[in-house]
Amino acid sequence: MNDVTNTPYEALEVGQKATFSKTVQEADVQLFAAVSGDRNPVHLDADFAAGTLFKERIAHGMYSGALISAAIACELPGPGTIYLGQQLSFSRPVKLGDTLRVELEILEKQPKNRVRIATRVFNQNDEQVVDGEAQVLAPRKQETFQLAELPPISIG
């Protein structure tokens, strides 16, 4: 298990940053489709996707949103953070095999432990694929958590 210490509201500083990275795998796209119910053929059917402006299959846009959620939950502010809202703009497609880097930046501390966070996602070529902003409720106190290991999952 991984130990992660959160950053409580009082310790957060405007300009503070954190990152989270993940490479998009075939299994990620298949599992995201299964969990979300989004079976758009541009994500799952190579022949269909070849006839689109993308010319190949792409990951679901909200997959990038899910990585932002993971970054907020596991990096900054970390475990115990409550999501209140998220605005997203998608600027480039995410392709299978892309390595995505979520960059978080604290923009503003608001009353009642509310925090505005810039949420930007870049691919391995430093091209921005998502721009956004989250509003969260930061944890009140610093705690260390053991994050559960994810179970092995096979697609078949």
Image (cartoon, rainbow, N blue to C red):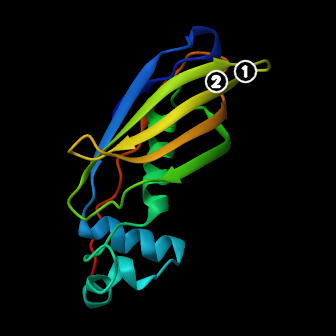
User: Is 24 on the left-hand or right-hand side of 130?
Assistant: left
In the image, is 120 to the left or to the right of 20? right
Disc 1 to disc 2, C-alpha distance:
7 Å
- Viewer can see residue 76: no
Asked where in the image residue 40 lies, by quadrant, the reply is bottom left
The residue pinned by badge 2 equals 139
Q: Residues within 10 Å of mark 1 (few under 14, many from 20)?
A: some
26 and 93: which is toward the camera? 93
Q: Quadrant of the N terminus?
A: top left
Residue hosting label 1? 113
Residue that appears at 33% across and 60% down: 94
Depicted 3 relative to depicted 9: above or below = below
Residue lying furthest bottom: 47
Tell me: residue 152, above or below residue 123: below
Q: Quadrant of residue 85?
A: top right
Rate crowding at label 2 as few (under 14), some (14 to 19) or many (20 or more) other CA atoms within 10 Å: many
The answer to whether the residues at label 1 and label 2 have Cβ atoms under 8 Å apart is: yes
Q: Is 78 situated above or below 34?
A: above
